[in-house]
Image (cartoon, rainbow, N blue to C red):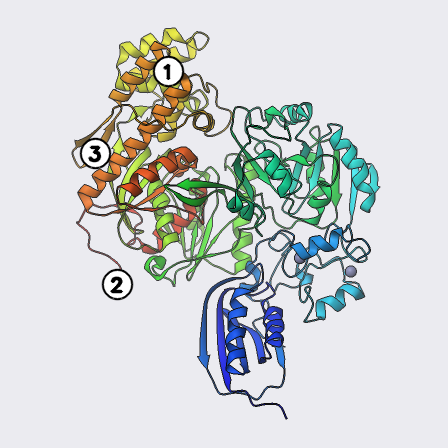
Amino acid sequence: MRKRPTRAVRIVIRGIVQGVGFRPHAFTTASKHRVTGWVSNALKGVLIHGEGAPSDVRRFICALKEDAPRMASILDVSIEDVKPGGYTGFHIRVSRTDGQRETLLSPDVSTCPDCLEEVLRVGGRHHRYPFTNCTNCGPRFTIVRALPYDRTSTAMSGFPMCPDCDREYRDVRDRRFHAQPVACPECGPTLWLEDASGRRLAEGDAVWTPLHGMLSGGSLAGIKGLGGFHIACSAENPSAVRMLRERKSRPRKALAVMVRDLETAREVCRLDSDDAEILTSPQAPIVILQRRDDPPLRLADDLASGQRSLGIMLPYTPLHHLLLSGDSRVLVMTSGNRRGMPLAIDNQEARRQLEGITDVFLMHDRPIVRRCDDSVVRPTDAGGERVQVIIRRSRGYAPRPLILDAAVVGDAGTDVLATGGEERNTFCLLSGDQAFLSQHMGTLRYEETVEDYRSSISDLAGLLKITPQVVACDLHPAYRSTALAREMVERGSMRLVRVQHHHAHHAAVLAEHGRGQRTIGLVADGFGFGDDGTLWGLEILWADPGAYRRLISMVQVPVPGGERAVQRPLRMALAHLHTFLGDAEAARMLGRFRGHGEDLEVALAQCRRGINAPLTSSCGRLFDAVASLLDVCRRSHYSGQPAVELSEMAGWSTSGYPFSLDEHGDLHLWDLTGMWEALCRDVHRGCAPDEIASRFQRTVGDMMAAGVRKAREITGCTSVTLSGGVFQNPTLLDGLCSILVDDGFEVLLPCEVPINDGGLSLGQAAVARNAPRGGSRHVPCGARSNHRH
Ligand code: ZN
Ligand code: ZN
Ligand code: FE
């Protein structure tokens, strides 16, 4: 006779626990601890009935949490004692909710150690098979076509399982139980190599020897991967890297590399155990790390010219592991697109788009349903605390939702679409307390990207079955994302909420941290359309997710020629000198820059007359001005280049230049006259540019800190959020955080969403939920009582 159980519990596990192998995990864990009962998927998580000896049940609960599957993310576990049901075994119940929304949310996951071991092990079914995956790893978001999530509604529909795969798929004890994309050489997708004219050179496992040879020989290869194509070449071969830059018209921007393994990563960059953990995480993003001064493995100088940092990632599919197993242990892996175009995902499209760029293609026949670029993160010290700043949140992260706290969730019955910004766009769908941030959409400037953006919105909304009643967008009238929002409102019955750019930046951080109360928000970025029609940039707000007041800004300067000044940063130097040191000093500077004369002549005239010279308090443009004056960067090829190159050379001085912070009506303004006087004096004296750059960087930090202290004086608040693209600069972020933390501030940083404009859409969504009807508004300080009920 079986001993009667003495304890029975009903366990509800909430979080991302469906479609990630949680039920098999519960099954094996139950067997191990002699617990009987059942497990099933419920609407918002996993429901378990377990019974057995009290000590066994206790261990069972612990192990459920602690040994949870790699892709699971547990939010909370509730346990309730119930009447025993007299179960003799443990069963997986197939529930009606199987395949509903929750199971769909899994991002793509990098190859797990078990699968990698199988790929490397000689003799097994999966030996050297590039599409090996299991419940704990493999493609998800990029192969799903529709609900419910089963094989027939994925890109695997054309590959019926062979009997061996089918057996594993049905075996509840198997690692491949109910893993929809499972495949083996018998039944799954295949690889081939083709030349630029489309001629097949090799197939299957025979592709590797010729491909490795071509890569070591300096060829450029188009590689079809998980969320799109890459362009690959040997990172150790300077002429290959140069050729890639030429053919892709990408003269300066840093190139990311994929390295064979952690050991190789250590030969190239300095990395500690935290960095290693991010590199090997299920998300497997590109991690920006410091290059070693004495690298045992020398890479082409041209990868990230003049930069101390390098973006590296590890192979994240078996295909990539095999790709990196040749002579080249480090490959440049840059996105497979032509400038301004979305990443190629379709074979035919790749052949067309990459014609003239790649010499050879590694193709496969598993369709990529959804475009998903590599994610980029930068581990940084922020005032002594290690944080992970997200530069691009895409593959591995999207579309995992952020669960919003009740304090910021607002009117939860309203579903919201937030259309995001213009650069590094993401959009956000907010339903209930779940905020789904889209994959990276890129810059919405070119027709093809905008088209992709539009279809991605309907795609994700359709997939998640969200029908927004509200659409939120930026204030900028010329953003394509604003135009789309307006169009949707005109077409349908949606309500429009327009959100000021910097308020959205700040609200994104508040949303992530569940802060509903008014907080100081320091936002530093390039341009954001202000409620006064000027281009804001360096701002301190006093705001909650519903409304804001602008407390502090910078004395505005003209942007002579608009966009042209962004590409020609010397124009911004001229504008700053004209504003802070006067016309004579600006005119004198003209003489110093031969070759730029005529262009700057025009710019100075624009500053003088205020024609085609919109006003800005941009922090990004301030970096541009200094970078160009110091001749760090006089021609910007990509957004933010002068700031990136300046911050790469600059350190953090013990003291900065003088500046002042003065009251002007209800606003305080940073005045940079003192800084520009002293900085120009240093330039004339012939001080080393990196010294000047370091003092400048320190000045920006000091200005920011002084502003935040002033905001504390005005509001009494001691919490501050930091956001905006300028904080991608690790030295500034760390330096400022140190000052603020020492000064007793609680510093809130975005860690789940991009710190740059990629995070805007979450903030817009939060504002749409919390703002009184009519949208994000400038409110007089203290004039508004808390509007939440
Ligand atoms: Zn696996
Ligand atoms: Zn098979
Ligand atoms: Fe911004």
Q: Is residue 647 visible?
A: yes
Image side of residue 523 versus residue 178, left or right: left
Q: Looking at the image, do the residues carrying marks 2 and 3 touch, with CB atoms under 8 Å apart?
A: no
Q: Is residue 616 visible?
A: no
Residue at 37% over, 50% down = 496
For label 1, the residue is 603
Q: Residues within 10 Å of mark 1 (few under 14, many from 20)?
A: many
Of the residues tagged 1 and 3, which is closer to the observer? 3
Q: Nearer the viewer, residue 124 or 263?
A: 263
For label 2, the residue is 789
Q: On the rendered image, what quadrant is the C terminus found in? A: bottom left
Residue 362, given in percent of the width and then of the height, sits at 74, 40
Specify the quadrant of the image occupied by residue 335: top right
Considering only vertical position in the picture, is 457 above or below 61? Answer: above
Of the residues tagged 2 and 3, which is closer to the observer? 3
Residue 437, given in percent of the width and then of the height, sits at 48, 51
Residue at 54% over, 80% down = 50
For label 3, the residue is 668
